[in-house]
Amino acid sequence: MSENTIKVTLVRSPAHRRENHKACVRGLGLRRMNHTREVLDTPENRGMINKVSYMLRVEEN
């Protein structure tokens, strides 16, 4: 991807979490534990990452 990406990894399960937190995880494209995706560094993605940061590992490129 382009240089403005963030690598996010799901490290905690979204099971038994609030529905809007589950929706953020799905919106980031994360499907299962230890799944890693590179997402564009946009304000929308940053907001979703901030909301569920307790479930993610974030690496900036």
Image: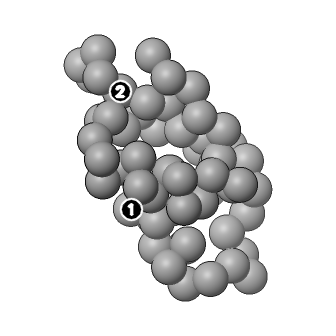
User: Is 23 left, or right, of 15 in this rendering?
Assistant: left
Name which of mark 2 and mark 1 comes first in the sequence.
Answer: 2
> Could you tell me which quadrant the C terminus lies in?
top left
| Type of amino acid under label 1 | Gly
Q: Residue 5 occupies which quadrant of the picture?
A: top left
Q: Which mark is residue 5?
A: 2
Q: Which residue is mark 1?
A: 27
User: For numbered disc 2, what is the local secondary structure?
Assistant: strand
Q: Are marks 2 and 1 in contact (CB under 8 Å)?
A: no
Q: Is residue 36 visible?
A: no
Q: Residue 55 occupies which quadrant of the picture?
A: bottom right
Q: Residue 48 occupies which quadrant of the picture?
A: bottom left
* Residue pictured at 50% horizontal, 51% vertical: 49
| Type of amino acid under label 2 | Thr
Image coords of residue 38 (percent x, y): 41, 33
Categorize mark 2 by other alpha carbons within 10 Å: few (<14), some (14-19), many (20+).
Answer: some
User: For numbered disc 1, what is the local secondary structure?
Assistant: helix
